[in-house]
Structures are given as C-alpha cells and as structure tokens.
Amino acid sequence: MHVAVFSSKPYDEHFLGAAASGTHELDFLEARLTPQTAVLARGADAVCAFVNDQVNAAVLAEFKALGVGIVALRAAGYNNVDLDAAQRCGITIAYVPAYSPDAVAEHALAMMMALNRNIHRAWLRVREGNFALEGLLGFNMRGRCVGIIGTGRIGAAMVRIMLGMGCRVIAHDPVPDPTLGIAYLPLDAVLAEADILTLHCPLTPATRHLIDAATIARMKRGVMLINTSRGAIVDTAAVIAGLKTGAIGHLGLDVYEEEAGLFFEDKSDAMIGDDVFARLLTFPNVLVTGHQGFFTAEALTAIAQTTIANLAAFAATGRAVHEIAAPSAG
Ligand code: NAI
C-alpha cells in the first residue's frame, strides 16, 4: 500500500521503515495532519497518524474524496479521532492498543522520583558548583499512599511498580481489575487519601477536566499529581492556582492540554506564546516533559510492528487487526 505518514520524525522513519521492510510504500510527511494538510495524502491508500494529528470530520471527508481507506494510528489513545465521521465516510480506524504499558508507567515513576528528590534542581545546582542541600528535601516512598486513576494496561503496570516500592496503593476505575489485589474506592476517597495521584484513564467527555478546582479542593494538601495520560484530563488554570496556594505540592506533566503545535518540535529559537504553559515552567516543583512516555526503543518497535500489521491485514482482507468502532455502532 501507499501510506502517507503524517507528523513523521526521523525515529518514525527508522522504526516504521524497519517494520515494513519494503512491503509498503511509506511517504514520510513532516506536516501535522489538519484540514489544511489532509490533501497531502493525495495518491495514498492509507494514512498513518499520531496523537496530535486532527482526524476530524473535515479531514475524513477529504480522505474519502482522495480514496484513503484506512487511518492507522501509531498510538494507543484515540481521543483525536471523530469515530462517527469515520464510520460515515467508510474509513477504517486502526490503532495500537498495547505496545509497552511499562514504558509509560516507568516514565510516570521517573517523574515522581525526580520531583520527590528534586533531581531536576540538584542537577542544575551541582553544575553551578552549588552543593547545598537546603530546598532539596524529599520523602520516602515506602509507606506512602499512591492513588491510581485508571488501572487498565498502563495503570496496572503502575500498580505493580508502586507495590514493589512498598507503597500503599488505592485506585479508582469504573472497571476494577480484581487480579491486581488492591482496594478500589470512589474517586473522592482516592482524592482524599492519596499522597501521590497518577492519572492513567483515557480522555473522554467524562474525564475531561477530571482534575479541576473542585477535585483539587478534595485532595490532601501538598499532594503530588502526575499526568502521563492526556493533557485535557487536567484543568491547567486550576492546577496553577493549586500550586500557588500549596494545595498541590508537586506536579509532573508529560502531556498538556494545548500541547498540539508545541510538543514534538524544537521551539528553542522561538518565543513561547502560551502564557499558561510559560507560567507552569516558573514553578520549582513542576516538571514537564514533552509527551515522551512512549519513547523507548521497545515501545517504538512494538508500535511500528503493530501499525504495519494493521496495514498489511487491511490490504489483504479489508480489515485491520486492531480496529476502533464508532461508539454509536455499539
Ligand atoms: P486502557 O484502555 O488499557 O486503560 C484505561 C483504563 O481507564 C481502563 O481500565 C478504564 O476502565 C479506565 N477508565 C475509563 N474511564 C475512567 C474514569 N472516568 N475514571 C477512572 N478510570 C477510568 O488504556 P492504557 O493503555 O492503560 O492507556 C491509558 C491512557 O494513557 C491512554 O488513553 C492514553 O491517553 C495515555 N497514553 C499516554 C502515553 C504517553 O506517551 N504519555 C502513551 C500511551 C498512552
């Protein structure tokens, strides 16, 4: 198949190229997918898209006109896709349901530990010849209460890591996993008890701004909040207000509500026009990474292999291995 790969980076070329090994014609496009750039898929039978690409009704209508039969997401989350519009256009949406839950869970752990022990600040100090410890005080993880919101594939990996560190783990998920051996509680109880909260639920209408002024008010004062899921689960303005009053003690974000157009790009020569994002970067107890939870060699290999398997199956049978149905299709 001829595949237009949007938002592509050198690492996508490397891993997708290796997985395809010449079986598909891959056209690597740097452009992010938007209604304006969708036309770049002209001549392609398939599109490969990433997390900040807009797979909305206008884009899908354009793809239908161009004869694109499938959009293969090289991602697990699909909140950026209008599934009803895809169904109306007769375009298959494929994704990579599980590639390496450990990659994201381990990144969440890295954020927790860096924030707790002030590694980001210590690194800067030592480089300046400042070996003073004042301001770097951390806390032991053993015995702390960790609240996990969403215990699917990534959340379950997080549960195992936290139990291994001797933490008390509680969780909230509308679909509990009894094999994890942890207590599931109503959301409010998790918010009230957790010293550390880590978000691993998908972005849906129900979870949009799940963390807002009202939920922050129910958390333990000084809570550590980690979001490696999707930016819009957190109301950034409310979190900034919480940081200013000390209601939130540490904040680790791998995702940000307005990350599209910012993350995955080198903006070091540009000015950051987003004042909310810029304010976040001024807090010493905030650590932001640019959506890199998935970015391990193991995860990229698995993502590429599943994406190529989705495309190959669609070319052969008209069905991808992992398809997402429109919610209204039941
Ligand atoms: P999953 O589908 O295996 O698990 C999601 C879990 O969240 C399910 O158990 C579900 O029942 C639960 N859930 C749904 N609504 C909820 C709610 N209102 N409250 C609490 N729990 C709720 O998904 P997986 O693979 O664990 O991924 C989770 C999310 O992580 C993805 O949707 C994606 O947004 C994000 N992600 C981030 C990456 C990164 O690089 N930072 C990479 C991959 C995924």
Image: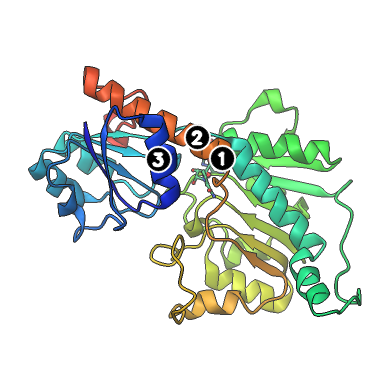
Position in image of residue 65 (x %, y %):
8, 44
- What secondary structure is found at the residue carrying circle 2? helix
- Residue type at mark 2: give it: Thr
- What secondary structure is found at the residue carrying circle 1? helix
From the image, state whether disc 1 or disc 3 is nearer to you. 1
* Lower sequence index among marks 1 and 3: 3
User: For the image shown, how many numbered marks are present on the structure?
Assistant: 3
Quarter of the image with the C terminus is top left
In the displayed structure, would residue 126 be above or below residue 323?
below
Query: Relative to 261, is 199 on the left or the right?
Result: right
- What secondary structure is found at the residue carrying circle 3? loop
Residue pointed to by mark 1:
297
Which is more toward the observer, 285 or 303?
303
Which is more toward the observer, 297 or 276?
297
Badges 2 and 1: C-beta atoms under 8 Å apart?
yes
Within-10-Å neighbours for mark 2: few <14, some 14–19, many 20+: some
- Residue type at mark 3: give it: Arg
What residue appears at the point 72 percent right and 70 percent down from the top-left corner? 285
Q: Which mark is residue 301?
A: 2
